[in-house]
Image: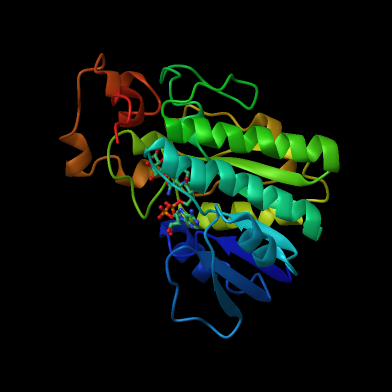
Amino acid sequence: MKRVLLTGAAGNLGKMMRTSLADWASELRLSDIETVDDLLPNEEFVRCDLADADAVMALVEGCDAIVHFGGISTENSFENILSGNIKGAYHIYEAARQQGVKRLFFASSNHVVGFHHRETLLDANSPMRPDSLYGVSKGFGELLAQYYYDKFGIESALVRIGSCFPKPLNRRMLSTWLSEGDLTDLIKKVYAVDRLGCTIIYGVSNNPSTWWDNRHAKFIGWTAKDSSEVFEHEAYLEEERRDPNDPEVRFQGGVFASAGHFED
Ligand code: NAI
Ligand code: 15L
């Protein structure tokens, strides 16, 4: 890859991917509303608020690919979600169109489908059932990407990331966990495949328990290698067993689904 734009570079996944994609892109243009320092020789930093259309247009200029991690990453006020995720996604896609970027990795979220029960196996054709305003905004991003594909041929991987952390933080994440290595490999595969289209992919490792089936994305050639199995018997997870009728346990989205409406 030549020049890759990585938005959300100051965040958890942005920090992870700076390291793991270092040998993949000849140049990484890092961006965030927060400062990113300690730049490596092949990195540059451009501070940019995704809600600012002109700034995003300038940010995307000269980039060959966009890995879009930037925005609000959990439930929040509608105003913040509107700025970071709804306007932000629109500005990124519109800049991609005008600047000629042909393929994007869009960090969607499992919270687009978080109101499905855990005993339901979902695939790319399952209806959206967002569990939060945050999940709704990711659904908007996915529809926007589909529109830019159908109208302009801009390809996207719509990656409904599960839980990407060094290890599962709770019992739910035994099913939703995505390792850093599997995420890195997925990004590389998304840009290596000849034809991507606009494809929904569940970003999840090869865990023993899963709620998501990636059969419609098999053509990408990505197979998750890591598994949450190694963490299964850790005491902090055993101690967390709950009533199966607890709303947090019934729904795939966990606390995002069981929580009340976000109040400012
Ligand atoms: P994070 O919250 O650590 O990072 C997001 C970054 O976006 C932050 O550095 C923040 O400063 C930046 N940002 C927020 N509003 C902005 C704005 N208006 N303009 C410019 N930058 C702005 O989130 P994380 O964990 O790194 O996630 C990255 C992406 O992946 C997010 O889009 C998130 O929704 C998605 N995702 C992450 C999951 C995970 O397990 N970490 C699971 C599902 C989705
Ligand atoms: C997400 O979408 C969030 O960005 C992340 O912080 C986790 O909460 C993750 O989902 C999850 O469902 O575990």
Looking at the picture, tell me which residue is in the foreground, 145 or 118.
Answer: 145
Looking at the picture, tell me which residue is in the foreground, 231 or 89.
Answer: 89
Q: Decide: is 97 above or below 115.
A: below
Residue at image position (32%, 25%) is 261
Residue at image position (35%, 25%) is 257
Q: x and y percent of residue 28 in the render?
A: 62, 72
Residue at image position (84%, 37%) is 151
Q: Decide: is 20 above or below 88.
A: below
Q: x and y percent of residue 233 in the render?
A: 24, 40
Q: Is residue 172 visible?
A: yes
Q: Is 76 left or right of 196, judged from the image as shown?
A: left
Q: Decide: is 166 above or below 137.
A: below
Q: x and y percent of residue 192 in the render?
A: 75, 56
Q: How is the image coloured?
A: rainbow
Q: Is residue 223 visible?
A: no
Q: Is 254 left or right of 131, judged from the image as shown?
A: left
Q: Decide: is 22 above or below 146.
A: below
Looking at the picture, tell me which residue is in the foreground, 124 or 144.
Answer: 144
Q: Is 42 left or right of 196, judged from the image as shown?
A: left
Total marks drawn?
0
Looking at the picture, tell me which residue is in the foreground, 80 or 29.
Answer: 80
Quarter of the image with the N terminus is bottom right
